[in-house]
Amino acid sequence: MASKPPTDFDATADALYVLAPTAFTAARNERADEVKKSDPQLAKAIRALHRPTVAAWAANLLAHRHHDLVRQLMDLGQALREAQEHLAGEQLRGLADQRRLLIRALTEQARRDAAAAGHPLASDAVADLDRTLSAALADPDAARALAEGRLTAALEPPLWPGAAPSRTEAGQPNLSTDVGASPDTGTPPARRRPAAERRSHRASATDAPPGDRQDAAAQARAEREWERKRDKARIAVTAAETAEREAADRAAEAERELRSARASRQRAQDEADRAEAALVQARERDDRARDALARADALVRDTETASDSARGRVARAREAARETAERHRRLEND
């Protein structure tokens, strides 16, 4: 941590949650120990902070270092929810395209940040980050949790747009209840009557006793709630189709990356094969050179032996010639 660590909880938490998960626990405990004597309550609060997962850490980096992108995500989420509320299909399709591009941009930025920090994101961490960003788009509470930059685990998007998120132990939005369920019983309300029948029913309800009118009003509210949930279910279908297209895009991109990786592996294998063949050839050339050197050495030794023998014969011949000349001189003198 810095030489002058922050003295308040918020600043300390912000400083900790941009650290890589592998460094988090030691830094947290060190900071808690530093303030334990002067502020035991602060030390206790710091030590209670949970280490983030890799995906949560990557999301926290986005929140702390790229406020503009996170703000775009929050604004886009608000626009998507408004379009869903008003059943603006054409607008939803346009926003869905923006959603895909923005999540891709955020994911790529997080991958670059994590790699620069020495902790590249694995595929499962990227998938968790993608779900976290999708959750922030779908639910304002999740968006605020992301923007705070203190996530400890990935966020899970709701089952469908507009669903009330539940909370995990970490206090983060998760999943919700079934589409079309009654708030009290979890079952659909009574079958929806035709519009004319409903109008007739409402008209006659004004002439009914107070108890009957209350029952009619309750039934009307139940019908409206059922219609509202039906509309949200239709929106959910649109969102699911969009998610399916995005998943197909990601699958196609993964397939392209897989093909590229396989091609790279094949090229590396080919290069290794060529290097192995070159090594074998080099060894064969070395063996031939060693054999030639050995033959040359043997030839030199044979030549030296022959030379020594020739020099001996020359010396003996000279000696014989000298002796012959000496005998010839003695004969002439006699």
Image (cartoon, helix red, strand yellow):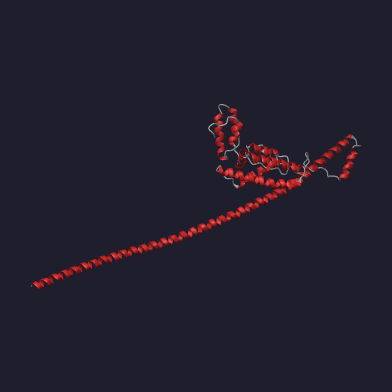
Q: Count all numbered tags in the image, as a single digit.
A: 0
Q: Hey, which residue is sitting farthest left in the picture? A: 334
Is 319 placed above or below 129 here?
below
The quarter of the image holding the C terminus is bottom left
Name the residue furthest right.
207
- Between 244 and 205, the one lying in front of the other is 244
Whole-percent x, y for residue 317 in the image = 20, 69
Quarter where residue 121 is shown: top right
Residue 112, horizontal then vertical, whole percent: 59, 44
Residue at the image position 60 percent from the left and 53 percent from the top: 258
Task: Give me the residue at 54% from left, 57% from top.
Answer: 267
> Residue 153 occupies which quadrant of the picture?
top right
Instruction: Tell me the quadrant of the picture where the N terminus can be found.
Output: top right
Which residue appears at 29% of the width and 65% of the height? 303
Residue 311 vs residue 63: left or right? left
Where residue 269 appears, x then y in whole percent? 53, 57
Task: Between residue 183 and residue 332, name the one nearer to us.
Answer: 332
